[in-house]
Structures are given as C-alpha cells and as structure tokens.
Amino acid sequence: MTHARESLPGHVAIIMDGNGRWAESRNLRRTRGHAEGVESVRAATRECARIGIGQLTLFAFSEENWKRPQREVSLLMRLLRRFLVGERGEIMDNNIRLTAVGRIDRLPDDVRRALDRTREMSAGNDGMNLCLALSYGGQQEIVDAVRSIAERVRAGELDPDAITRETIDDHLYQPNMPPVDLMIRTAGEMRISNFLLWKLSYAELYVTEACWPGFREQELAQALDAYAKRVRKFGGLVPGAQRSGKTN
C-alpha cells in the first residue's frame, strides 16, 4: 500500500483484541489465537516501519490481564519472551527501536531480561519506535505521574502554580511519547479500555470487526485510508467553516 507521507499518522496505537474469539470461532484453543496474533504483530510492525510511521504502540498486556487464569497468563508471558528474543533480527533489519511502557517490574524475571536486552540492542536504531504497553494501565500511569509530581512539590522542588500539561507529560512512563494520532481497535469493541488515556486526548479512533489474528496489511491499509479522510480540528473549526457557518 502507498500513502502520501503527509497523510500518515505519526503515532499509531493498537488495542489487539479478539485472539480468543478468533480461535473459538474455529473450534481451536484460545492459546492458538494468541500464537496467531503474534503473526499479526509481525505483519503490522513490518508494514508500519516500511511506510514511515514514526511510532507504533501495541497494547500487549494490561494491568487487568493479571486477573486472567494463571495458565493463560503464563502462556502470554512465554509468547512475549519468545517474541522479544525471536524478533531481534527483524527489529534490527528494519531499523526499529524497541521501547516499553507500563509497570515493567511486575513482569517475570526472564521476560524482563529479554526485554532489557532487546531494548539495549535496538537503542541506536533511528527508524520506527515500536512501543509495547506491558502490565500497563492508563489510570495508573496518571496516578504514578501525579504521585511523582506531588513528591517534588513536597520536597520544595516544584511550585504547584508552575504545574502544566507539560509537567504531567514529563512524569509519564515515557515522557517523550508523542500524542496518538490514530488508535485502532480490533474485534469490533467500542471502548478504549484504559489505554494511553493522556495521549489519546485528540486521537482519531478506528474500529474494525476483524479479530487481531486476522488483522494484516489489508486491514491496516483500510485504517490508514480512513484516517487520511478525517479532518482533524483539535477543538477548533474546519478552515473556512466560520465564514460558511458550518461548525462540524
């Protein structure tokens, strides 16, 4: 697929939903859906890097996912570690820099070591930033940021009157993360599920009925085509609308 660079979102975020439903609809175990979903991660990452997306953030594991059955959590952690190790060649070949957001300290030691190693290996790459949201919750991220700011105020390092939106940005898990331009959710779910709440403030939302294991280059192209047709107003008016009386 080809898109003019100016029509591309700089930051795409994806809620990868429907692995279990995809498997169950085929009379397969839910675990097969998770394994097939890894192929979709590879396809989306490769394509976004190829066409020039600046950052791709994938909601890989939420804080709430720890409540799932232990067997499923253990499988997801094994798949995550396998991905982090197995995709190193792909990451390096495509000049991708891997980062992560979330409460990384909650991950199993072997997963955390694999993540740290892959981040270190790719730190010098200057292509697309692939960010994995791991043990992540948007509300918790804001709470952690507010707590850090409060500690600075208590220590006399920061005047409360000097706190701005930029102050909160600077205390988020990844302070240099750009705002999300396009948020994609698969499996037809119409909610944002506590994902990147601060960064999604003016994101364009796109929902597809395709479950994540079936989301490949064609589905990504459809999402990007839909984004290219949107008019982003950021709370203002469409150019020329004030003269014509139109406000939507």
Image (cartoon, rainbow, N blue to C red):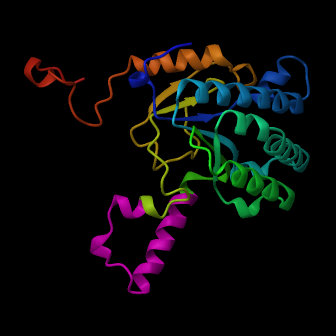
Residue 202, by quadrant, is: top left
Residue 87: x and y in percent read: 79, 38
Residue at the far bottom: name it: 155
On whether residue 201 falls in the magenta region, the answer is no
The answer to whether residue 189 is seen in the rendering is: no
Q: Is residue 202 left or right of residue 113?
A: left
Residue 234: x and y in percent read: 30, 36
Q: Residue drawn at (45%, 25%), measured in percent from left and top? A: 8
Residue 168 against residue 90 in the figure, above or below: below
The answer to whether residue 163 is seen in the rendering is: yes
Of residue 44 and residue 141, the one placed in the foreground of this image is: 44
Residue 152 against residue 53 in the figure, above or below: below
**Numbered range of the magenta stretch:** 140-168
Residue 233 against residue 199 in the figure, above or below: above
Q: Is residue 174 left or right of residue 203?
A: right
Of residue 81 and residue 191, the one placed in the foreground of this image is: 81
Q: Residue drawn at (75%, 24%), measured in percent from left and top? A: 213
Q: Residue drawn at (71%, 34%), measured in percent from left and top? A: 93
Residue 28: x and y in percent read: 91, 23
The number of numbered badges drawn on the structure is 0
Residue 218, by quadrant, is: top right
Give the overall secondary structure of the magenta segment: helix
Q: Residue drawn at (43%, 18%), measured in percent from left and top? A: 4
On whether residue 154 falls in the magenta region, the answer is yes
The N terminus is located in which quarter? Answer: top right
The C terminus is located in which quarter? Answer: top left
Residue 171: x and y in percent read: 48, 64
